[in-house]
Image (tube, helix red, strand yellow):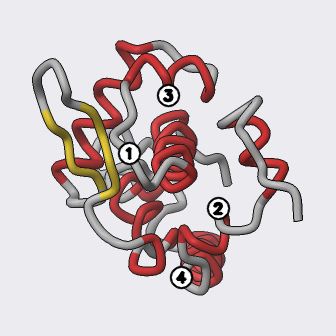
């Protein structure tokens, strides 16, 4: 199973916003830290906002933030919503399906079951699990941040 570039970028965006939960972030910041183009990023941000994962604010003091608490953003939901129209194999496509075995193939059911198991596993993971207390992630997203000494 291959995850689309859109979903990969979407998870990075959500993690970046989670790591910067106390402020609005900009598209250019995300692009720089998540190694993606601003034009592709704009499409992903727009879709995440449509799906109510992100809140966007236009204008001079605008930016992007999570639309709900991190512990309410279930990674399986994100994947399902973004990958739902991408067929996992040719035989799952509504159009351009040229497989002559589609009516007799048992592999199709096994693949569908495997995909559901994949999503079910991701349903156990929320955004806070990916972000909170992840020092390595914060070092990437917020290099040079001030850390108080104990």
Near-viewer residue (77 or 90): 77
Please give the label number shown on residue 43.
none
Label 2 close to label 3 by CB (< 8 Å): no
Horizontally, residue 50 falls left or right of residue 45, namely: left
Where residue 93 sits: x, y (%)?
37, 50
Please give the label number shown on residue 23.
1
Kindly identify which residue carries mark 3: 30
Marks 4/3: CA–CA distance: 25 Å
Dot in front, 4 or 3: 3
Residue 52 drawn above or below residue 118: above
Marks 1/4: CA–CA distance: 27 Å
Please give the label number shown on residue 123.
4
Element class at badge 1:
loop
Kindly identify which residue carries mark 2: 131
Q: The N terminus lies in which quarter of the figure?
A: bottom right
Near-viewer residue (147 or 94): 147
Near-viewer residue (105 or 61): 61
First of labels 4, 3 by sequence position? 3
Quadrant of the image occupied by residue 70: bottom left
Determine the residue positioned at 71% across, 37% down.
145
Marks 2/4: CA–CA distance: 16 Å
Dot in front, 2 or 4: 2
């Amino acid at each position: 199973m291959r995850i689309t570039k859109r979903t990969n970028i979407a998870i990075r965006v959500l993690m970046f916003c989670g790591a910067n939960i106390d402020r609005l972030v900009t598209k250019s910041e995300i692009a720089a830290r998540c190694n993606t183009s601003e034009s592709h990023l704009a499409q992903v941000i727009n879709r995440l906002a449509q799906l109510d994962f992100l809140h966007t604010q236009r204008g001079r003091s605008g930016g992007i933030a999570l639309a709900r608490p991190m512990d309410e953003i279930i990674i399986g939901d994100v994947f399902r919503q973004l990958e739902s129209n991408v067929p996992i194999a040719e035989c799952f496509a509504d159009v351009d399906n040229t497989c002559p075995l589609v009516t007799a193939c048992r592999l199709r059911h096994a693949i569908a079951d495997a995909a559901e198991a994949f999503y079910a596993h991701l349903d156990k993971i929320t955004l806070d699990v990916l972000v909170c207390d992840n020092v390595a992630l914060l070092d990437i997203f917020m290099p040079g941040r001030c850390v108080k000494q104990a």
